[in-house]
């Protein structure tokens, strides 16, 4: 009998005429369906796991199964897909990315720079969101990621939401709390 359990969160991006549908599977692993992009009459998608350099699956904190993903052409003209999640072992906001459909990284997903020195634990049950910033002429200029930090509250005793940003995708600025004066959601 087939299972009727669906992922609690899915995030879709498109890159180089391919569709990527990211989710957290029933074993708390980062997974995705890979298939044709918009305009294709083919609807065949294949299941893939995001794996680290040691070829081990990437595990997600079971208390934060909301993920975020972006697709962009970075300032050096490489196509990248980036996925943001709360890591199972540390609960830290984390990032994996794939450059040029893996052609620039031996076909492997790579741990992103967001983890470097980052001790930001994502609040249980919260969301993660990401967007690509653009200049006035439409060229991508950076990435912004938003998340709620565990154990942090603003002056109204509400959980804080912080902004992480990078201009080129390789060096992240320290997070900035954006909800200091928010009295209610």
Image: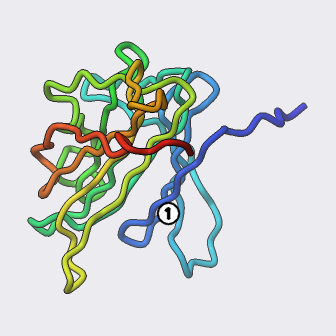
Q: Residue at x 82, y 33 (%)?
A: 3
Q: Is residue 24 above or below residue 42?
A: above
Which residue sits furthest right? 1
| In-image side of 63 versus 173 (left or right) | right
Which residue has dot 1 on it? 19
User: Residue 76 sits in which quadrant?
Assistant: bottom left
Q: Is residue 141 above or below residue 170?
A: below
User: Residue 181 sits in which quadrant?
Assistant: top left
Q: Residue at x 30, y 63 (%)?
A: 132
Q: Is residue 101 above or below residue 51?
A: below
Q: Residue at x 38, y 66 (%)?
A: 15
User: Residue 180 sits in which quadrant?
Assistant: top left
* Image spot of residue 58 (x, y percent): 40, 27
| In-image side of 169 versus 71 (left or right) | left
Q: Residue at x 24, y 21 (%)?
A: 119
The quarter of the image holding the C terminus is top right
């Amino acid at each position: 009998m087939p299972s009727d359990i669906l992922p609690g969160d899915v995030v879709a991006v498109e890159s180089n005429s391919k569709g990527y549908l990211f989710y957290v599977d029933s074993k708390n692993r980062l997974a995705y369906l890979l298939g044709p992009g918009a305009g294709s009459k083919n609807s065949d998608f294949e299941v893939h796991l995001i794996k680290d350099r040691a070829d081990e699956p990437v595990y997600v904190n079971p208390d934060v199964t909301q993920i975020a993903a972006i697709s962009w052409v970075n300032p050096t003209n490489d196509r990248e897909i980036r996925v943001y999640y709360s890591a199972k072992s540390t609960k830290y906001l984390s990032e994996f990315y794939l450059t040029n459909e893996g052609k620039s990284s031996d076909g492997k997903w790579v741990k992103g720079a967001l983890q470097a020195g980052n001790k930001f634990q994502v609040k249980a049950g919260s969301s993660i969101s990401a967007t690509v910033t653009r200049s006035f002429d439409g060229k991508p200029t950076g990435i912004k990621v938003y998340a709620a930090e565990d154990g942090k509250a603003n002056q109204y005793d509400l959980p804080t939401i912080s902004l992480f940003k990078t201009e080129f995708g390789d060096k992240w600025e320290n997070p900035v709390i954006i909800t200091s004066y928010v009295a209610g959601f």
